[in-house]
Image (tube, rainbow, N blue to C red):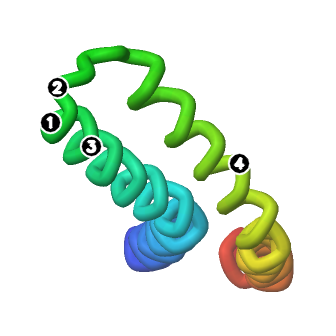
Amino acid sequence: MTPDTVIKLAEQSIYTIIMVAAPMLLIALGVGLLVSVFQAMTQIQEQTLAFVPKIIAVFISIVLFGPWMLTRLLDFTRNLYQQLPHIIG
């Protein structure tokens, strides 16, 4: 296994992680921003008000984007197993 192969595999892994996590993180960021603006406008400083909507939004995003995320992970894993003879030597 050459250093170039290791770097390429690490690059593919990080890219896959970012692509799979991005929908959930972006939705949580958007909901958190909306809740923060609402809290600033109404001066309500309740911690659960910020936490519960983000959890619900992340669960909904998992339901909506779950099949796509699973497909991306399976494609990465399948590609990794197919490249295994080349990686090992």
Helix, strand or loop at label 4? It is helix
- Residue 18: image x %, image y %? 46, 66
**Front disc: 3 or 4:** 3
The residue drawn where x is 43% and y is 26% is: 49
Measured Cα–Cα span from mark 4 to mark 1: 25 Å
Of the numbered discs 2 and 3, the one sitting upstream in the chain is 3
Quadrant assignment for the N terminus: bottom right
Answer whether residue 29 is visible to the viewer in this image. Answer: yes
- Mark 4 and mark 2 lie on one chain; the one further toward the N terminus is 2
Q: In this orientation, which residue lies closer to the viewer: 5 or 40?
A: 40
Cα separation between marks 1 and 3: 5 Å
Q: Is residue 18 left or right of residue 78?
A: left
The answer to whether mark 1 and mark 3 are in CB contact below 8 A is yes
Tell me which label, 3 or 4, sits earlier in the chain.
3
Residue type highlighted by circle 3:
Phe
Mark 2 in CB contact with mark 1 (< 8 angstroms): yes
Q: Which label belongs to residue 28?
A: none
Residue ID for mark 3: 38
- Disc number placed over residue 59 in the picture, else none: 4
Tell me: residue 60, above or below residue 67.
above
- Neighbor class of circle 2 (other Cα within 10 Å; few <14, some 14-19, many 20+) is few
The reply to whether residue 85 is in sight is no
**Position of residue 61 measured from the top left corner of the image (x, y, whole percent):** 66, 61
Q: Which image quadrant is residue 44 in?
A: top left
Residue tagged by mark 2? 43
What is the C-alpha distance between the residues marked 2 and 1?
Answer: 5 Å
Alpha-carbon distance for marks 4 and 2? 27 Å
Task: Identify the secondary structure beneath mark 2.
Answer: loop
In the picture shown, does residue 63 fall above or below 67? above
